[in-house]
Image (tube, rainbow, N blue to C red):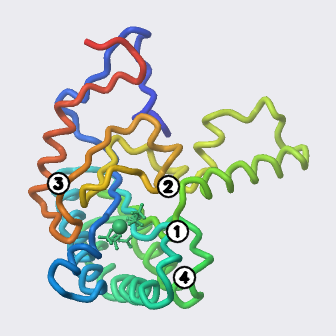
Amino acid sequence: MSASVQPETGRDAPVTAGGALPSHIAFIMDGNGRWARSRGLPVLAGHRAGAEAVRRCVRAAVAHGVRYVTLYAFSSENWRRGPREVGDLTNLLRYYLRHKVAELHAQGVRLRLIGELGRFEPSLREEMDRAEALTRGNTRLTLVLALSYGGRADILQAARRMAEAAVRGEISLSAIDETMIAGLLQTGDTPDPDLVVRTSGERRLSNFLLWQSAYAELAFLDVLWPDFTEQHFARLLDDYAGRERRFGGRNA
Ligand code: IPE
Ligand code: IPE
Ligand code: MG
């Protein structure tokens, strides 16, 4: 499961990306608000343009053969933005789930949703379930959409489930290890990200994939998310290919 992060190499062997394609890229899609503000438009226009950037990003991932893409679309903390912006974002999500999932399906994309999905209204959750069910059998690209997602909440729910299992006597304490924790995270069935990208010039993780990013390469782009294009995607791949991943081993 975490093979991309803990390769079985000799103790002193360097691990170089060496022309390799990342199998999993995770994006912190930031800058929609600033994009809109700089044009004198309402924030919703920025989120709409951001959704179009998602389509470009997915097309690029499929074209380059990247197997997993995770998109941070809404954080646990984004509920603080108030009912108006949250309503706009959920309406936009509903529109894309209803009208654009067929496009994902046609590209061979499997859609997965992670996060505290129970915080969204039941009708939206039904749309989410439908989209996941429609695309379940696809294998070209797994697109993970993180909604009401927080890295700490993810680790917390895994810890609670292990504690409950231990209290019930179903597992012994010695059975708790990194593999078990990784498997209980919401991302349990996806490999750890090789590359975490944040747009908009901000240089922080904002509670994204905290456990899973332990050895991810990081890339910070000065482009606002609605301006993200296939060319940016291709440049990220070039940049990644030149990096040396050591996982604590000796450098080359
Ligand atoms: C990212 O864009 C999208 C979400 C967090 C939903 P922002 O809305 O955070 O854009 P800025 O940071 O205000 O520019
Ligand atoms: C992070 O962006 C969350 C998403 C991109 C969905 P924010 O704009 O919410 O992060 P902060 O508040 O600037 O750290
Ligand atoms: Mg932001």
Give how far apart the Cα atoms at labels 3 and 1 are.
27 Å
Q: Which mark is residue 125?
A: 4
Q: Secondary structure at mark 2?
A: loop
| Within-10-Å neighbours for mark 4: few <14, some 14–19, many 20+ | some
Q: Which mark is residue 233?
A: 3
Question: Nearer the N terminus, badge 2 or badge 4?
Answer: 4
Percent x, y for residue 100? 29, 82
Q: Secondary structure at mark 1?
A: helix
Q: Which three-letter amino acid code belongs to the residue tagged 2?
A: Asn
Quickly name the residue at label 1: 77
Question: Nearer the N terminus, badge 3 or badge 2?
Answer: 2
Q: Quadrant of residue 5?
A: top left
Q: Viewed as shown, does residue 70 lie left or right of 174?
A: left
Residue at coordinates 21% horizontally, 52% vertically from top-left? 221
Give how far apart the Cα atoms at labels 4 and 1 are.
19 Å
Q: Which three-letter amino acid code belongs to the residue tagged 1?
A: Glu
Residue behind label 2 places its C-beta within 8 angstroms of ligand 2 = yes
Q: Which mark is residue 207?
A: 2
Residue behind label 1 places its C-beta within 8 angstroms of ligand 2 = yes
| Within-10-Å neighbours for mark 2: few <14, some 14–19, many 20+ | some
Residue at coordinates 46% horizontally, 72% vertically from top-left? 132
Q: Which three-letter amino acid code belongs to the residue tagged 4?
A: Arg
| Within-10-Å neighbours for mark 3: few <14, some 14–19, many 20+ | some
